[in-house]
Image (tube, helix red, strand yellow):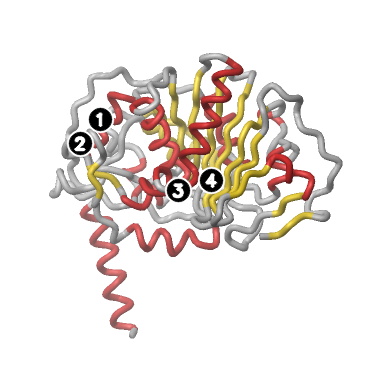
Amino acid sequence: MERNTWLILAIFTCLFVSSEGRELKIKHTHHTPVYNHTLTTILVHYASAVYMSDLTELFTWTCARCDGVTEGFQMIELVVDIQNCLQAFVGVAEDLNSIVIAFRGTQENSIQNWIEDLFWKQLDLDYPGMPDAMVHRGFYYAYHNTTIRSAILNAVKRAQEYYGDINIIATGHSMGGAMAAFCGLDLIVNCQAQNVQVVTFGQPRIGNAVFATYYSKLLPNTIRVTNGHDIVPHLPPYYYYFPQKTYHHFPTEVWLHNIGLGSLIYTVEKVCDSSGEDPTCSRSVSGNSIADHIEYFGVRLSGDAWRSCRIVMDHALVDYRRTDGEGNFVLSRDPATPVIKLNTQSGAGGNHV
């Protein structure tokens, strides 16, 4: 048994060493997006809020993570896919003049198993309409083949009908970042949406270099924020000697990392090159930290409860709820109606799922 354990560790070490070699150069004809620190540090709070399990507080935007820079956000739709443990919401941030779409990432107590699975995942799905572009089946299906997509697109349409053709920003952390990327592409390619921006945190690779090239042309206004030694942006592994078969990040990465100056430590935000795999950014360090994965800009990006897919919801939300035959549901409100006010306490009289 001990011999097998050392063999597994040796294989993992080889995977990381081989992924740090020379990189495939991909062509980009677009401009590098301008990194907006203020916007990014606002969006990380939305990426954090979507992890909340108290759906009453989340839908009414009264949760502990729903104040400060996100105060005044108008929730339109909250979708929960019970079958696949997925959660996302759509609303309007009037101060940003934008529709904000946020996707929840992997729950904390399953991150370890999820990371182990990603070591062995191979590209296995041709992306529709993009010859030779291949993507990760699990991330693609999480957005396209669940209740998430239809609910999101419906909410975006209703928001645009009421607010007009305002900007759309998709965000998410970890697997939620992967879903946000597919959502942004979907809005551009299939919905002919304009002014779509994607900002993700700790996102894994989701496709090959051909896919990354297509993506960067269609969605140039994309920022992938990575943090220190966060393990997830290193996965699935990058192999330079299989240029057409390896996973490849799309641009533009912004790498957060600490530098020391005497006894002082500063966090630097480095805007990386347009390759998607800048060897001087997160790829310059080993990806070995889960701690760096679950906190960005001092904001915790994980669930508020250890139990996976646990939710709490007050009976007062029944009028806003639509449920399908498999128990998945959407909480929805008309953008023209006043903000919902519920005189409830967190967890009191709620349903636990």
The reply to whether callout 2 and callout 3 are in contact (CB within 8 Å) is: no
Spatial separation of the CA atoms under disc 4 and disc 3: 14 Å
Q: Which residue lies under the disc numbered 1?
A: 214
Q: As drawn, is 26 to the left or to the right of 296?
A: left
Residue situated in front as seen by the camera: 80 or 270: 80
Spatial separation of the CA atoms under disc 4 and disc 2: 27 Å
Give the residue displayed 41% in from the left and 35% down from the top.
224
Query: Which label lies toward us, 4 or 3?
Result: 3
Q: Residue 146 carries which label?
A: 3
The amino acid beneath tag 4 is: Arg
Residue situated in front as seen by the camera: 100 or 32: 100
In terms of secondary structure, where does tag 2 sit? helix
Q: Which residue lies under the disc numbered 4?
A: 104
The amino acid beneath tag 1 is: Tyr
Q: Is residue 265 visible?
A: no
Which residue occupies the extreme bottom position in the image? 1
Q: As drawn, is 314 to the left or to the right of 180?
A: right
Spatial separation of the CA atoms under disc 2 and disc 1: 6 Å
Spatial separation of the CA atoms under disc 1 and disc 3: 24 Å
Q: Which mark is residue 210?
A: 2
Q: Which is nearer the N-term, disc 4 or disc 2?
A: 4
Residue 35 rendering spot, x and y as whole percentages:
44, 23
Asked where in the image residue 11 lies, by quadrant, the reply is bottom left
Residue 82 rendering spot, x and y as whole percentages:
56, 55
Give the residue displayed 74% in from the left and 44% down from the top.
317
Residue 112 rendering spot, x and y as whole percentages:
46, 62
